Image (cartoon, rainbow, N blue to C red):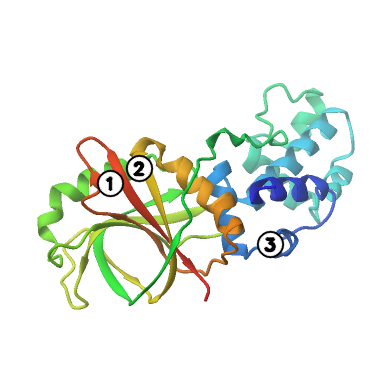
Amino acid sequence: MTITRKVIWQIESRLAQPISLATLSDLCGVSPYHLSRTFSVAIGMSPMAYARARRLSLAAKSLANGEDILSVALEAQYGSHEAFTRAFVSQFGILPNAVRKSGSVQNLTLQEALKMDNSKTVDLDAPRIETRDSFYVIGMTVTCKFGHPEAIPGLWDQFNAREDDVDAIANTPAYGVCHASDQDGCFDYTAGRQVDKNAAVPDGMQKITIPAGKYAVFVHKGHIADFGDTVQTVWNSALAEHKLTTRQAPDFELYDGRFNPETGRGEVEIWIPVDG
């Protein structure tokens, strides 16, 4: 069973109970960071956002059936009418009492229980294990959500147009660095080049420090349009399959001569920080 399947099962089994990211990670046998990253890549939202949406969707159905608002709020794990109302309005844009009066959820976008589609799983070679010294990348950054990488191709276009502004180390590859991730499934993505420690940072760019450590290196082969399927496979099953435990540090893509940016085809390395 993939990690995402485990998370869905655990959440669906505990919708009427208190649950936290730490609890889910213990139940699924991975770190909170790994669990949040895996689920967000596969689903497009964080585990706790999914749990919240599921609880509020069930609450909306109960309200439409005429149940008391406070009782519904407590069942959805909210300690007060006010807290429940704020969450309900944030989720659906309508007051709980309006749903109760209408007796219908027809105009609400409800979150139904997810069923995982395994069709996006790809065959991957076993990763090689590398240890790297710390290094630095300067590039342009955009904030994204895991599972929603739409802004990244445009970022590369912007960076490529200004690549000569970066005093990059000669003959080094390009890097796509994922960093500053949070439990809501957001992260910063930096498209850039490797530089010396004291390299100047051009306007509109950022310098990222990649700490020293051990990495599991997976290889995406084929067109870059299918890159997301490879990333999902890495986080959702391949790391566990090879008994690798992640550590919280930036992970990155490495683009060298094996990848052709004109055709979008070739090989891209995915470096995942692991313990050991």
**Around disc 3, counting alpha carbons within 10 Å, would you say few (fewer than 14), some (14 to 19), or many (20 or more)?**
some
Q: Amino acid at mark 3?
A: Ser
**Around disc 1, counting alpha carbons within 10 Å, would you say few (fewer than 14), some (14 to 19), or many (20 or more)?**
some
Q: Which residue carries the number 1 mark? A: 155
Residue nearest the observer in this picture, 93 or 230: 230
Q: Of all residues shown, which one is farthest toward the front?
A: 125
Q: Amino acid at mark 2?
A: Ala
Identified at 42% across, 49% down, the residue is 144
How many labels, in total? 3
Horizontal and vertical percent for residue 250? 42, 65
Horizontal and vertical percent for residue 139? 24, 59
Label whose residue precedes the other's in the sequence (3 or 1): 3
Horizontal and vertical percent for residue 173? 22, 58
**Around disc 2, counting alpha carbons within 10 Å, would you say few (fewer than 14), some (14 to 19), or many (20 or more)?**
few
Mark 3 in CB contact with mark 2 (< 8 angstroms): no
Examine the rendered structure and indicate whether residue 236 appears above or below residue 199.
above
Q: Which residue carries the number 2 mark? A: 151
Q: Which label sits on residue 25? A: 3
Query: Is 61 positioned to the left or the right of 199 in the image?
Result: right
Q: CA distance from mark 3 to mark 2?
A: 29 Å
Residue nearest the observer in this picture, 60 or 146: 146
Examine the rendered structure and indicate whether residue 239 appears above or below residue 230.
below
Horizontal and vertical percent for residue 166? 14, 62
Q: CA distance from mark 3 to mark 1?
A: 33 Å
Q: Nearer the viewer, mark 3 or mark 2?
A: 3
Examine the rendered structure and indicate whether residue 83 appears above or below residue 195.
above
